Amino acid sequence: MSKDLYAENKILRRRLDDYLAQAHKNEAKLRRFQAHELKLIGLNSLIELIQAVLYPEPSMFNWDVVTLLLLDPEYELRRILEEDGVVLQDHPCLMFAAHPDDLDSLFPFSLFPLLGPYKARHHSALYTGAHRAPDSVALLPLVRHGKLIGSLNIGAHNVERFVKGVRTDFLEHLAAVVAICIENAANLERLKRQGLTDTLTAINNRRFFDQRLKEELERAARDGAALTCLLLDVDHFKRVNDTYGHQTGDHVLREVAALIRAQLRGSDVLSRYGGEEFAALLARTGLNEAGEVAERIRANVAGHQFVDAEGQAFQVTISIGLAAYHPEQRSGAGRMDGEMLVGHADRALYEAKSAGRNKVVSAGEIDLDADRAQWY
């Protein structure tokens, strides 16, 4: 064999070895992606899914930073997570967009992954939760039915890890799987809550409140933190129905529910308790702070203009009773139960009604010893 043929054969063999090595690397990479995607598909809980996306096993990928931005204009996803006990501050790499434009600006030209060097002007907001900004990034659009629902943002402390122009097949497939899984998990959470939602006001119903009351009392006792219950009742609601009709009465209830919700945190529990009565639980909130919240609700309802079917404006007021349980203070010995907490708030509400309505009355912090002495 001539020297030229030998050299050419050696080059071809080296190229073949390189191709085989790259094929083995791609095969191993494909297996890692498939294993990760199968894990995601097998998760039904929204928080479990988000945790699996944000915190993949280190042995699976050599990613240094992962953040997730989800479209949540109605605060729905955050409320679902908070109702499941998730403290959002514990997950700084999980972010939410309030408007579709916030996502569209990330992918102005196409809905394909964007790879390249980290640029603080464009990328800093996506990596605020990271301990250190990455040197190269891969932004993966999460798309369902042609619309952006989020962005999965990967970063590396190697400027050559994500380079513009390389193939993104695996990343595109991963983004599609993540988008489908998030949509399915959110829909499943919505279905679970349908039986716990009041159809008229679109807030939680009495059944949901009773479930959360028990959970919040247990959490308050465990953490030694205050829990305040508010009972809110629309004044003279029968007069509204008699004067303006039941359709307008339904409209009033929906607007009052929205006015109350606007003054509460996403983690607070608001439910339609029955008829024109609402109930709220404010976790980690003492009497003074809860009283301020209640007064803002009362003032906002009283100052709001309601309109009947003919465009005639009118006003309604609301009465509020509140009671608090604080395990570390005047709670005495024994175990607090939900009936007792709501009962105290109900008595305060009755006092507010008796005193002329459109008032906030506090029953104070419950002293278990004194309360039991009253009944036995």
Image (cartoon, rainbow, N blue to C red):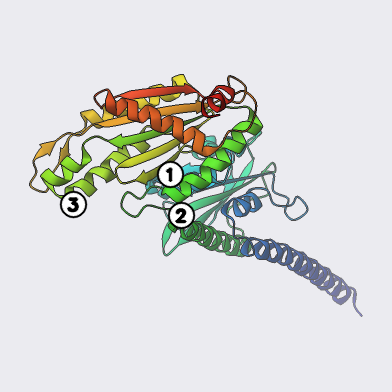
Residue 318 at x, y percent in the picture: 27, 32
Quadrant of the rendered structure where residue 27 is? bottom right
Residue beneath the point at 21% across and 36% down: 236
Q: Residue under circle 3? A: 247
Depth check, mark 3 against mark 1: the one in front is: 3
Residue 359 at x, y percent in the picture: 29, 24
Classify 10 Å Cα crowding around label 3: few (below 14), some (14-19), many (20 and above). Answer: few
Instruction: Give the CA distance from mark 3 to mark 2.
Output: 35 Å
Depth check, mark 1 against mark 2: the one in front is: 1
Q: Residue under circle 1? A: 75
Say whether marks 3 and 2 touch (CB < 8 Å).
no
Q: Residue under circle 2? A: 149
Q: Indicate which disc, 3 or 2, sits on the residue closer to the N terminus.
A: 2
Give SS at disc 2.
strand
Q: Indicate which disc, 3 or 1, sits on the residue closer to the N terminus.
A: 1
Q: What residue type is labelled 3?
A: Gln
Instruction: Give the CA distance from mark 3 to mark 1.
Output: 28 Å
Classify 10 Å Cα crowding around label 1: few (below 14), some (14-19), many (20 and above). Answer: few
Give SS at disc 3.
helix
Q: Residue furthest bottom?
A: 1
Identify which residue, 150 or 80, lies in the foreground.
80
Above/below status of 161 relative to 185: above
Q: Left or right: where does residue 245 sit relative to residue 140?
A: left
Q: Indicate which disc, 1 or 2, sits on the residue closer to the N terminus.
A: 1
Task: Point out the image quarter for the N terminus.
Answer: bottom right
Q: Which amino acid does label 2 sit on?
A: Ile
Q: Can residue 10 be seen in this view?
A: yes
Residue beneath the point at 61% across and 36% down: 219
